Image (tube, helix red, strand yellow):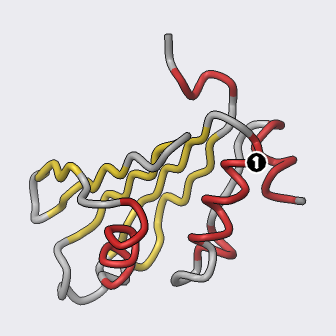
Amino acid sequence: EKPYAGGLWLRAPDEPFHPPVIDYLIERFGEPRVTPRAGGVSTYHFAPPGGTVRVTADEPGRGGALSAWWVHAHTPERLAELAELLIPWGTLRDTLRADTEQAREVLCS
């Protein structure tokens, strides 16, 4: 069973990468599981209670670095809490999107 099948997820595909956000997430959720990818890209997997925050980002310090975000929660309330923590960073307030009706209701509230 896919935990995100209920539609409670948000994403941002092309977000400018601000490396301090990783430190912020570590302070909030603990050390992530890091998966190295080709081309100096890494995926940071955070597992806060009741959800998931995954950031795939270019190497810190690279000019024009980008990141892609995927946020999932088990309840609408938890998704709203995670979104509230993240939207002050970079342009996530404008780029974080909801592709399902359940997530749109959370993001628009």
For label 1, count other residues whose C-alpha is less than 10 Å away and answer few (under 14), some (14-19) or many (20+).
Answer: few
Question: Residue at 67% across / 56% down in the picture?
Answer: 97
Q: x and y percent of residue 54 in the render?
A: 39, 51
- Foreground pick, 94 / 21: 21
Q: Image quarter for residue 61?
A: bottom left
User: Is residue 38 shown left or right of residue 55?
Assistant: left
The residue beneath circle 1 is 77
Describe the element under mark 1 as helix, strand or loop.
Answer: helix
User: Is residue 4 shown left or right of residue 19?
Assistant: right
**Residue extending farthest top:** 1
Question: Residue at 36% across / 52% down in the picture?
Answer: 46
Q: x and y percent of residue 22 in the render?
A: 32, 73
Three-letter residue code for mark 1: Glu
**In this picture, is 61 found above or below 22?**
below
Question: Residue at 45% across / 50% down in the picture?
Answer: 48
Quadrant containing the C terminus in the rendered view: bottom right
User: Is residue 70 shown left or right of residue 76?
Assistant: left
- Foreground pick, 55 / 30: 30
